[in-house]
Image (tube, grey):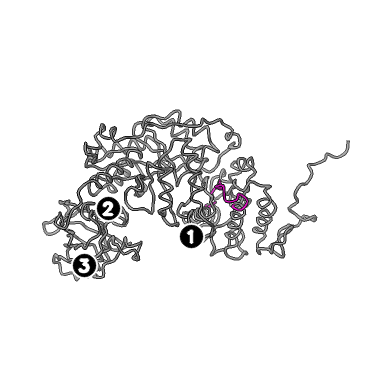
Amino acid sequence: AGAPRGLPVRVRLVRDDGAPLFTGQGRVPGTQIESSGSAKCDAYLWLIEHYLKTGRANPARLGYYLDGFWLRCWKAAGSENHTLSNHDFVIARRGVFFDLGVWDDEPAVDDPAQKPGTDARTLKALLRAAYDRSGGNEMLHAAGFVPWAYKYTTHKGGAWSAGGRHEPVPTEWRYAEILSCYNAYMDADALGLGAMANASFYQHYPLAERYPQNPRPTRETLQARGLLDAQGRLAPRAYVAHYVGDYDAAAWLYRELPRMWRDPARGATPLSWAFNPNLCERFPLGMAWARERRTTNDWFVAGDSGAGYLNPGFLTPPRAHSGLPSGLALWERHCLRFYRQWDITLTGFVIDGYAPGLSPEGLDAYSRFSPDGIVAQKIPAQGVHRGMPFLKMRADVDGSPADAARSILSLAGGLRPRCVVVRSILKSPAWYAGVEKELGRLAGDDLQVVDLYTLLALVRAHESSRATRPRPGPSGPALIEAAPKLTQGLAPLRIDDGPFRVTERDGAACWLSPRHQPPRYLYFEADDAFLEAGPAPVEIEIEFLDAGRGRIVLEYDSTNSAGPHEGAYQAHPAVLSRGDTGQWRREKFTLPDARFAGRQNGAADFRFFNGGDDLLVRAVRARRR
């Protein structure tokens, strides 16, 4: 019968004698391109020429998954993190795989002889070829994630070192900003929960044209719930919403959804599930199953940035890595399609990372496809843009329910009313129910947990009521002050770099700001009405104990756009020095350009830098001059 015949060879990636085809020298085989000097990167350049530029591969479907390097480092993390099971979806869509480093200042760990940045340049060449082949008219889907446990970062696990110079999170953010500059977004199958099987099969699940949510809050329903009065003003308490993440990867949703949705505590407290709506492409039945089994306390918002994880600040020029024209209109169309199908009108977290914050054009775009609000990193504390309310993401909370409740109370401190978003990752409904129980025990009626749609509706109502209130004139209220037992238009805020505790000295209550190591600050928030008429000269007064040594520097939110962080941290030129006299001192700072728009950490308006020993402060005042 003769010897069995094998399948015909379609593409040969080794030489006839079995030697490597790609050597990192001369020209890239089968092309007129000069070698990159890296055999690894030459293989990708060959792929770009023969498959991406010719249309033989789908430029809009990419996969960033670990290559054969896993055979050398598989003990560094769970065996499933080879992510081979994830390949089937990209293959079914005729996509392209890659595994390339993102930094310009170092060679790739798996190719140490290459010139620094060769991997990153190759990645950009691949993304540019995908952009060009799509005509710039299609968002590029990139499943997968930086293999941070194995290479390209400083991570160490057991005897294994990933060998890079940059931390894992900055490396993730670098990858995100590069993608964003080429109209590409992540479906972020990060390691740990990164394995997903059978997405090529799940993709065929028939979805309905629309999956409606619970009815959105209205002014009438907010009033009926006692959250607004007849004039549309918020009841004076703190309002907190949980951003329930991180579900910006089909693999994570696939792995965690059964556990979350079968938790008996689901429905006990309002939860805003951040399922990126584009995950319906790889896990449609999971998305539909969750919607069909929702409770009245299950709300759905878009997760990281929208219908895909990217940095929208890099969708508009200048686009640092690509120099391409704006992709904002394309992103808006892309998001709107998914938002309509899944009845989403709110984006729970815009990840800015290393990118600029949203431009005015970016805010305009979000106001059209996310009209019920956004929460972002690089944005003022709260406000409304073209009818769209916005809030700044405050912090992540973790630990036990009791630990999380204490963190939330610190974040929700300050003046009332106060609206706060907190983010948690992969926490169960039972955990959130425990957090709410602890909050009730610690804060009582002073704090209420709500869903994100309600929270952003309250922001919109608050800003609207402010706009209709008479603005104070030159003779209006001009003094606000705070002491540990007094809050009159001014309040201290506990921030990660601004911890304090209340103690007593010389028979008086005072705040103790710990000594400078690491840098410590004492933050304050001013009532919005104090400068509601606009920026004005202000005098800040501080009463402190002249004990120990060290500097005290006032940094305030100013109108000086050329100042640090566009004037949010303007340093006053007068610097106070402690002389350890043991006497209480009262000092004043005159601010000619106070803005107080809440642009500092935690929505603070000014802070005192403690550049020395423990600092004791018993009162702070602000006068409009």
Amino acid type, callout 1: Pro
Residue ranking furthest to the left = 507
Secondary structure at numbered mark 1: loop
Question: Hey, which quadrant is residue 533 in on the image?
Answer: bottom left
Mark 2 neighbour density, 10 Å: few (under 14) some (14–19) many (20 or more): many
The N terminus lies in quadrant? top right
- CB-based contact (under 8 Å), mark 1 and mark 2: no
How far apart are the two marked residues, 1 and 2, measured between alpha carbons?
A: 36 Å
601, above or below 287, in the image: below
Residue 413, percent across and down? Answer: 25, 48
19, above or below 432, in the image: below
Q: Is residue 10 visible?
A: yes
Residue 284, percent across and down? Answer: 53, 34
**136 is within the stretch colored magenta:** yes
Mark 1 or mark 2: name the one nearer the start of the chain.
1
Residue behind mark 2? 494
Residue 397, percent across and down? Answer: 36, 46
- Residue toward you, 105 or 162: 105
State which region is magenta: 131-148
Mark 3 or mark 1: name the one nearer the start of the chain.
1
- Residue toward you, 335 or 202: 335
> Closer to us: mark 3 or mark 2?
2
Amino acid type, callout 2: Arg
The C terminus lies in quadrant? bottom left
Residue behind mark 1? 318
Residue behind mark 3? 548
